[in-house]
Amino acid sequence: MSAAVPLPAPAPRDYALDACFLGPYGENDGLLEKLMVEFLRDHVYWRRNFHPEDPPTIATAAAHHPDYLAFESRMRRELHLLSAALKKSVPFHSPRYIGHMACDLLLPGLAAQMLTLPYNPNNVSEDAAPVTVDMEVQAGLQLARMLGYPHDPAKPACAFGHLTSGGTLANYQALRLALALKAFPVALRAAKVSGIELPADDWSAFNLSPAEGVATLEAWQHWLAAQTPAARMHWLQRVEAERVEQRGLAGFFAAHPSLRVPLVLAPVTAHYSWSKGLKLLGLGRDQLELLPTDGMRLDPAALRDTLVRCARERQPVLMCVAVLGSTEYGTIDPVHEVLAARDESRARGLDFSVHADAAWGGYLATLFRREDGSLRTRAEVAADYVRFPTAAVHAAFAALGDTDSATVDPHKLGYLPYGSGAFICRDHRPMALLAERADYVFHTGTPAGYLARYRSLGQFIPEGSKSGAAAAAVYVTHKVLPLDHRHFGRLPCATVRAAEAFHARARRFALDLADCVHALVPFAPDSNLVCLALNPRGNASVAGANAFVRALHDTLRCDPGQPLQLKEFFGSVTSLRPEALGAAETARILAGVALDAGTLERAGDDDRLLILRHTLMNPYLIDHENGISYIDRYFEFLGRRVRELTAATGHAQP
């Protein structure tokens, strides 16, 4: 039966990847050790040559003093204890780990971060980080180029990006910027600025397109620059008093009663950070409207209907979020359809920002970029795969350059250390609306020139302190592996091919174990994340299927109370919620695993279907050196465990 589902042909070995990681077995330990010893010595030489006329402060004899030796002993003991405790960590490096969005770390980034740490740069200004602040700004431009944004700092409409602790903070920054730009023309009207052309009413001012908002901001800045110093100060204070950042949300909307607090539209698959961000910004969770999906991808028809309703009810929209690789399923929203829906909405006087939440899938964009930054055709990309990319996935990535902002997580598919998320906006000019002054850090007004302005990075970002080591890791990695299909793209290429092999193997698994379990991949993978729904034969209840999957997951989850080696594989679990799937998709999937839809509980843990979730980031899932497929081994392991469970219980009961 298994022959009915052929597996994709194995990919040829890519030797260029062998130098990228420390390796599942620590194969490149010598390379990393040489790098670290070389650059630790280099750091020491730097210290000694800072002012070589200064004598050593710590006496040579200090190393023999009892107090020194006692301190060294305590330090060694605690470090040994730490090292022992860390052996219980999750083995992200291993091809046996196919759980959450984590993997081995790229050596260029790991080495760059470790090399930079002793210098301890604080990337808020060039006063505290003269080298790594510039690297962070350059890393933002590298990511902008990957996304298709304008990336020439000599041009006015250049993109801008900065690093964050993760995607959550990057999404929060996107909300801040969108609100600042949307509210600013309203503030100009309220301040009665007569020197520039403004919309006739608050609704129109609040619904300028992002490009029109930028043009209004620039017109204000040019008009202001032409005033006398006294007049300039007068108008600055007058406009500042009307801004939402000064008044606060309550004061701003009380002063403009014709305006309602805007909504943020996102698919039900959106990350929970959007709820966090709305709460942090003070907009409130009620302003997040979650849209239905079609196959766990945002439903364009539902978005269009929502926008028609919002225009009719004069309900403003701040932003629409398209998810480029959902955290739970790896699905890609139709970014191109979201942009088309916005174009249609503009004719009804309703405008908003479009944000691509590409925390997971951002680096997949390297597969679509030639070395010169231009877009590859779908046929060019598809030549390396069986099914990827679908026409919709290619269109979504092709449209990225027309979004207003994006979130990308280098610590996910960028294979870099936590925490290095990134926020990127298509046009840097609205960032001026977020600027915050602190005289003890930022000594002058806004400097002229793109690079000079953002060396005072702390004025524009949410953090007041941030590690420059993370910026060094991202920048150096992108220099070693440029963000195009021939360089960095080799990594996601290997993992998308692995996902296709995993998908095919899952279908064969379903045939091979059809006598004891119903198995179904609920959605063909858009990226390198594949889910699997399972239900033992003879069971028709969702509660029974969930109990069965929980028992399977117990053998796949991290358990700090047990030796790591007892686990053959590590995986994760998620759920399919009827309110997210919709009635038709819920019925299809439940029928596919022989479950009675009537057994879905209205409350409790069984109001959704639990499924296994597999994140396929490791480029060594197919071990060419030793002729091992860890994908085959995983399904052999899963098959044994399924048969053990069904033999022991007949079928899992709630």
Image (cartoon, rainbow, N blue to C red):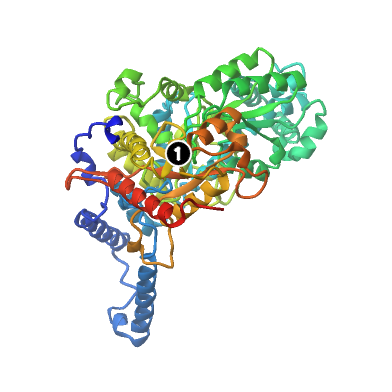
Closer-to-camera residue (537/427): 537
Q: How far across and down, in percent of the image, does residue 580 sit?
A: 59, 35
Q: Look at 35% across and 37% down and name the residue there.
A: 511
Res 475 quadrant in image: top left
Question: Dot 1, crowdedness within 10 Å: few (<14), some or many (≥20)?
Answer: many
Where does the N terminus fall, quadrant-wise? top left
Indicate left or right for 269 with 286 as reference: left
Closer-to-camera residue (3/442): 3
Q: How far across and down, in percent of the image, does residue 488 sit?
A: 31, 36
Q: How far across and down, in percent of the image, does residue 549 sit?
A: 48, 49
Q: Residue pushed farthest top?
A: 347
* Residue 207 can be seen, yes or no: yes
Indicate left or right for 346 with 20 as reference: right
- Total marks shown come to 1
Disc 1 marks which residue?
360
Indicate left or right for 36 with 552 as reference: left
Q: How far across and down, in percent of the image, does residue 142 sit?
A: 39, 34
Q: Is residue 126 above or below residue 376?
A: below
Q: Look at 55% across and 36% down and name the residue there.
A: 269
Q: Is residue 458 above or below residue 207?
A: below
Q: Is residue 250 above or below residue 572?
A: above
Q: Residue pushed farthest bottom?
A: 66
Res 404 quadrant in image: top right
Q: Amino acid at mark 1?
A: Trp
Disc 1 element: loop
Closer-to-camera residue (607/26): 607
* Residue 121 can be seen, yes or no: no
